[in-house]
Each structure stands twice: as C-alpha cells, then as structure tokens.
Image (spheres, coloured by chain):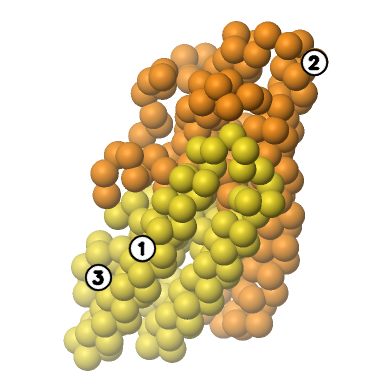
Chain colours: A yellow, B orange
Amino acid sequence: MLAALLVGFLVFSGGNGFAAKMFGKDTRALVRQVVADPERADAVVRELELGLQDLESVGKQLETLVKDFSTTDEDQASGFDELLPYLQMASEQRRNAQRVSLDRMFDLRQILTADEWNTLFARLKDQS
Amino acid sequence: MNDRLSCRLAALVSAALLIPAIALWAGSKGEPDPAADLRAGIQDVVADPARASKMLAAVDEIEKVIGELESLIASERASLRALLLDHGSSRAAVDASLTEFNANHESLARRCLTAHAALKAEATAAEWKKLRKLELEMMTFAATRSLGQSTPSGKKG
C-alpha cells in the first residue's frame, strides 16, 4: 500500500494523493453503492483494478530506483552529477504515472455520469 | 514492503523528488524536529567551523526548498481537485496544470539535490557516515508525514 500511496503522492502531489485513493481497493465497494447499473459498475471496478495495477507497477520501478539511489548516496564522494540521473529518472516516472493515471481517470469519467462522479469524489474525500 | 525499504523509499522521494511537510514541524511543541537534530549533529561532528557553517547553510536551503514545495503542492492539489471534480473539465486543462506544476516541482527538486550535494561535499567520509542517517531521518520524517503515515520514532544512530 505504501507503494500505491507513494505513487499517488507523486502523481497528485500530496499525502493521501487522490490517485491512491481513487484506485485503492476501498473505492470498489463505494462504486457498488454509487452506481446502480451493475454492468457499468463492473466496468468501473475493472478500470479501478487496472489503475491499481498501473500504480503498483510504477511503485516497483520506484523501489528499484530507490535502492540504486540509496546505494549511490551512501558514498560521500558521490555528488550532484552522480545523483542527478536518479532525480531525472524519478521525474520521468512521475510524469509517466501522471499520464497513465489520468488516462484511467478520464476513462472512468466516460463510464460514470456527472452525478455518480461527484458522489464518488465526495465520498472519497470524506474517507480521507 | 519492509521497514528498511519503506525508509529508503521515503528517503529517495524526499531527497530526489522532494516531499514537503517539513514546514509543519518547525516550532511545534512535542513534535520531533529532525532538522534541528541534523544541525546539532553537524555542530557535534564537524570540528571545522568554516565547513560546519557551510553545511548548516545547506540544511537551511533544504528546509527552505521544502517549504516552497509545501506551498507549491498545496496550490496544485487544490487546482487539480477542482479540475478533477468537474466532470466536464478537459484533459488539456489538467495536463496544462500538471505540466506547470512539474516544471516548478523539478526546479525545486534540483535545488534540493544541489543543497544535499553541497552538504555532502563539505563532509569527510567519516563525518558523512555519521550525518547521513540524520539527514535521512529528516527526509523520511517529511515523506512519511506527507504520505499520511505515522512519523518515525526518531531513533538515533
């Protein structure tokens, strides 16, 4: 879960990032409450599952990056030039995660009505 | 994910991508103050006043940058929330908001990395071995707070 939270942070900038909440497993139960049509609810849940998989995938990439950064940073002699590539890779990963998560969110908005979207959003906010 | 990995994860994000929330800790009664611990560690470990002064300046810069990130992130969070809540908002509008945010975020991250490297450059290998953990705790503290996790217990090494 930390990985998902972390990616959520990276994607939407803050603790309890919206992406982490939106694609978290708890949202699936909320969807069942909010979306009366079972077929559309299923479609939304599938999209949420894929979104979570996206986040977990990025989280794994970050774990590798973290490990490599940490190893390099332990050496006092490693300075800006040695560490900068990690910063650049992490920034690229963040941008990629943003793009992928936004793709999913806009897919979700296609499936959900405005009322459903607003209700879901409000309930997610209440949970934070 | 084990604690060690979680710590590393948080530390990287703090050091390289920069997570805010440090601004919240300063001056709060009963709150850990890892930045103060790092400053005290520098004064304790580094005998050379000139180098210690430069290292303290680097810590000041890291703290300042993180404060700026706090503001940036709060602003972007509000902007994104409004855009995403609006069922009719365009993808282009969201992308534009994030593009601007990313540019500012990466600029601040680079400043923080510069300060981090400056701190290291002034330390000897032996000093860095002692101080790294304190800097890591400072970063981890910020990361865990921003991620909504329990803050570290402030173990010293």
Q: Secondary structure at mark 1?
A: helix
Name the mark nearer the viewer: 3 or 1: 1
Do the residues under discs 2 and 1 have CB atoms within 8 angstroms?
no
Q: Which residue is mark 1?
A: A60
Q: Amino acid at mark 1?
A: Lys
Name the mark nearer the viewer: 2 or 1: 2
- Tell me the quarter of the picture where residue A79 sits: top right
Q: CA distance from mark 2 to mark 1?
A: 42 Å
Q: Amino acid at mark 3?
A: Arg
Work out whether residue B156 can be spotted.
yes
Q: CA distance from mark 3 to mark 1?
A: 23 Å
Q: CA distance from mark 2 to mark 3?
A: 58 Å
Please state if A80 lies on the left or on the right of B127 as rendered.
right
Residue at point 69%, 47% (across, down): A80
Q: Which mark is residue A28?
A: 3
Q: Which mark is residue B50?
A: 2
